[in-house]
Image (cartoon, rainbow, N blue to C red):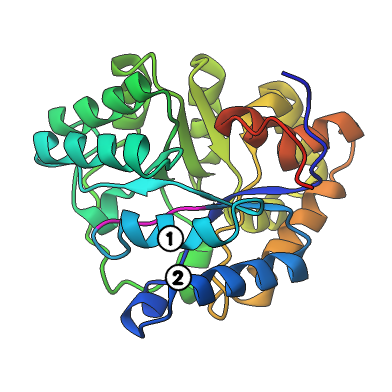
Amino acid sequence: MALMSWSVVDFHLHVPERWVREGVSPREAAERLVEFMDGAGIDIGVVLPIAPYVSNDYVYRVVSYEPKRLVGFASVVPNPADVAVGELRRAVEDLGLRGLKLHPGMQGFCVRHPHVVRVVRFAGELGVPVVVHAMLGDLSTLYFKSGEHSLPSPDRLEDYELLPVLATETTIVYAHMGGLFGFREFMAIAAGHPNVFLDTSYSLVTIVEEIGAERFSVYVRHLGADKLVFGSDDIPGFTPEWLSAKRQIEIIRGLPNLSEEEKELILSGNAARLIGLESSPA
C-alpha cells in the first residue's frame, strides 16, 4: 500500500464525555471535532470512546456526519468476555467501526486477565487494531487529568510485555508511549514485538522537555519511525495549550536528525496503514 498524502492523522482523539452528558448531538459533536482539527492542522481524526461513558452508537453517528475527516473506534468493557466479544463484533461488522480502545484504569480491569486477552485476540480475528492506555506515570496527569472515573491500576510492565505474546495476530497500540516514566520500557516492548506500536499522545511533550528533542530522536532512530503513530489526546476545551495537538505536531516536525520521510511516517503514514486509509480525501 502506498504512503498516503495526508499531512497529519491523529490516532488519539476523544468525544468528551461531558458532551454526551450535556446532550450534544452527534452532528454538533462532529462539527466541533472538525473545527478543532482545522485549528490544529489535523487532516484525519481517529475518535476513541471509552465504554461505558461514551457509546459505540454515539461514535458511529458522530463519524457518519464527517466520514472523510473522522474514523471511529469501538470500546467495550472486556469483562465478561462473552458480552464484550458480542458488542465488539456488532460495532465492527454492523457499525463499521475500525478499531478498539481499552483503558484499564477507567474500565477497571487488569491487562493480564484472561477475559481481556480473549477480547484482544478477537479484535485480531476481526482485523482491527487495539489501542490500550499504557502509562507508568506522567507529570501531565498531575497537572490536569481528571480522576473522576479512574481506578488504581494493578497492571505491571510485565503484563504489557505479555499481552502481545498472547495475542500475536492482533495489532496493539500502546497509548502515550508508556508515559514519561515508562517510555524507554515501552519502546523496548515495541522493538521486540512486530505487532506492537506506540502512540505519542501528550507524553511526547513531557518526555522531550525532560530529555531533549535530540536525545528523543536518538531513541526514535533506534526503535524505528515505523513503530510510532502520532496521537494527541487533545480534548477540546480541556487540554491546556502546552499539551495541545498543535504543539505536539510542531515537536515532531522539529525533531532533529530525522528525515522528512520518517516524520511523515509518524504523523500520518503509519496510522493510515494501521486503519486501512487507501485514498486521499477529496
Q: Tell me which residue sits at (20%, 34%) in the image.
A: 85
Q: Residue 50: within the magenta?
A: yes
Per the image, label 1 sits on a secondary structure element best described as helix
Q: Please state the horizontal and vertical placement of residue 277, each as a whole percent of the image.
A: 65, 34
Residue at coordinates 45% horizontally, 31% vertically from top-left? 129
Task: Give the quarter of the figure containing the N terminus.
Answer: top right
Q: Which mark is residue 280?
A: none
Relative to 95, residue 152 above or below: below
The residue type indicated by label 2 comes to Pro
**Residue of label 2:** 26
Q: Which residues are magenta?
A: 47-51
Residues at marks 2 and 1, CA–CA distance in whole angstroms: 6 Å
Question: Is 86 left, or right, of 129 in this rendering?
Answer: left
Residue 276: image location, x then y, percent? 60, 29
- Packing grade of label 1 (10 A; few <14, some 14-19, many >=20) is some
| Residue holding disc 1 | 61
As drawn, 45 above or below 30: above
Tell me whether circle 2 and circle 1 mark residues in contact (CB < 8 Å).
yes
Q: Horizontal placement of 216 versus 168: left or right?
A: right
Query: Dominant secondary structure of the magenta stretch?
Result: loop
> Which residue is farthest bottom?
22
